Image: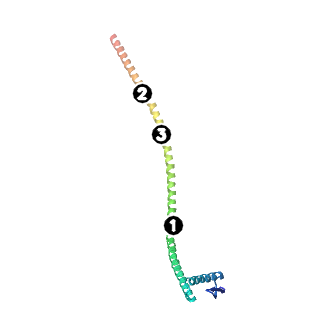
Amino acid sequence: MPEKNRINVIIDGRNFTVVGADDEDYVKSLAHYVDKRIKNLATKNERLSQTMAATLAALNIADELFKTKEKLYELERKAKEPLEKFGGLTQELEESKAKIKDLEKLCLEYKDEVIKTKLSKEEQYKEISKIKEELEKKEKEIEELKKQNKNLHDKNFQNQLELVEVRKELSEILKLFDDEE
């Protein structure tokens, strides 16, 4: 149990002993505030008795207290809104984190697919290059074969011409031979 303090204070010229667990400086500052309020009212209206001045000061202090409590209540109410939203925001944040994690996973999968596609593309380019080289070789072979074919065709033509010449000569020889017989 907290220790009780006995504190002497002066309010409106009268001595009071306050018993409580509060700090002495705090209690004295409260007493000074009340004393100041009472004196302020008494100097404004000299016809007020001590009791009336104390009562009006108490009424003013109670008014301050009620307005302060009302402001406190309003501030507490306003402070609750963000706290209530905080729960929803926390859940939304967790959902967003999960979504980000899923998207990062999907991104990695897409990166893997891109890498595989690039590798496949490179292999296809290599295969196309090989096929082009083979095609160039075959085209060269075809050109060579065309040249050989032309040469053979030309030779064949020459041979046919020679054959025609030889037949002609043979025919003349046979004619001469027949004429001699």
- Closer to the eye: label 3 or 2: 3
Kindly check if marks 3 and 2 are in contact, taking CB atoms under 8 A apart as contact: no
CA distance for labels 1 and 3? 56 Å
Q: Report the amino acid beneath label 2.
A: Lys
Which label lies toward us, 1 or 3?
A: 1
Q: Report the residue marked by disc 3.
A: 132
Residue 1 visible here = no
Q: What element carries label 3?
A: helix
- Foreground mark, 2 or 1, reads 1
- In the rendered image, which quarter contains the N terminus? bottom right
Dividing the picture into quarters, in which one does residue 28 lie? Answer: bottom right
Q: Residue at x 59, y 83 (%)?
A: 39
Amino acid at dot 3: Lys
User: Whole-percent x and y of residue 137?
Assistant: 48, 36
Residue annotated with mark 1: 93
Mark 2 → mark 1, Cα distance in angstroms: 82 Å
